[in-house]
Amino acid sequence: MNYMKTAILLVALAVLLIWVGGLIGGPRGAMIAFIFALVLNFGSFWFSDRIVLAMYKARELPESRFPETYQIVEELATDANMPRPKVYLAPNDTPNAFATGRDPEHAVVCVTRGILDMLNREELKGVIAHEMAHIKNRDTLIMTVTATLASAIMMLAYMARWTAIFGGFGGRGSRNRSGGIIGLLAISILAPLAAILIQLAISRSREYGADDRGAHMAGSGEGLATALGKLHAASSRYRMNASPQTAHLFIVNPLSGNFIAGLFSTHPPVDKRVERLKAL
C-alpha cells in the first residue's frame, strides 16, 4: 500500500513540474520539466534517504564509542525478526531521532547528539524501537520520498514567484502574459500549502502506529512515554535547525517552538501519544 501511495506522489509531482514548465517556457519548458521530473522521481526513490542524511550532516555512529546503542538496536532487531538497520549520528544538540530508507534492508536510524546525552537506556530503547517500528511498518519509504518531494515543491514555489516578478515567462500577448503571471503567483502560494497537506496526510496516523508497535518491540511503553515528554519539553525550549519539509520524519516535531509551524504540526499531540502508551 505504501508503494502505491509513493507512486501516486511521484506522478503528482511530475504533473506539477510539467505544468509549471509549460507556464514558464511553453512546450519547450514542459519538455524540459518532463525530463527533470523523470530524473527527480528516480532520485527520490533510490537516493532520498541519502539526501535527508546529508541535509543533517549525519555520519555513521562508531560502534566502538557507542556499544550500548548498538546493543539496543541488535536486541530489537533480533526480537522483531528484521535486519539490523545502520545507526547514524546527526551532530545536533537538540534531542530528536528519525528513520529513513526505502526498505528494511536499506534502513537507517538516525539519532542526534542531544538525544544520546539526555536519555537513559530504557528511554533510548523506546525511541529506537519507535523508529524501527517505522521501518518494520515500511513507513520510511513514503516518509522520506515525501520529504524530497516537499523540498521540490518548495523549490517550484520560489521559481514560480521570481518568474512572475521578473516576467520571464514565455507568453506573447498581454492577456497571455497576465494570465500566466497570475498562474505562477497562484503556484507560489498554493504549492507550499500542498506540501504541508501531503505531510499532514501521511504522518499523524503513522506516528500512532509506530508508538504502538515500538512499545511492543521494547516490551513496555513506559520508556517511550517518558522519552516523548522529555523530547517535547526540550524541543519547545531549543528549536532545532530543521527543514520544514522534513519535520514529519522526526519522532517529535523539531519546529514545535514555532507558533505557525505548530498550527500545521505533522505530529499528533505528545500528551495524547503519552496517554495511549501508558494505557498499554
Image: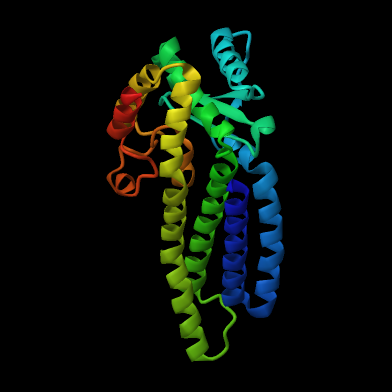
Residue at 67% of width from left, 79% of height from top?
27
Viewer can see residue 15: yes
Residue at 55% of width from left, 35% of height from top?
137
Q: How far from the left and from the top, in percent, is residue 94?
A: 40, 26
Question: Which picture quadrant has residue 185?
Answer: bottom left
Question: Which picture quadrant has residue 99?
Answer: top right
Q: Nearer the viewer, residue 83 or 40?
A: 83
Looking at the image, residue 172 lies above or below residue 40: below
Q: How far from the left and from the top, in percent, is residue 217?
A: 50, 21
Is 123 positioned to the left or the right of 19 in the image?
Answer: left
Residue at 39% of width from left, 35% of height from top?
254
Looking at the image, residue 180 lies above or below residue 189: below
Is 53 positioned to the left or the right of 216 in the image?
Answer: right
Question: Which picture quadrant has residue 7?
Answer: bottom right
Taking the view exactly as shown, the residue that stands out farthest to the front is: 280
Q: How far from the left and from the top, in percent, is residue 130?
A: 48, 27
Q: Nearer the viewer, residue 222 or 93?
A: 222
| Structure colour scheme | rainbow
Q: Nearer the viewer, residue 229 or 138?
A: 138
Q: How far from the left and from the top, in percent, is residue 98?
A: 50, 31
Residue at 53% of width from left, 46% of height from top?
147
Q: How many marks?
A: 0
Looking at the image, residue 91 lies above or below residue 188: above
Viewer can see residue 112: no
User: The C terminus lies in which quarter of the figure?
Assistant: top left
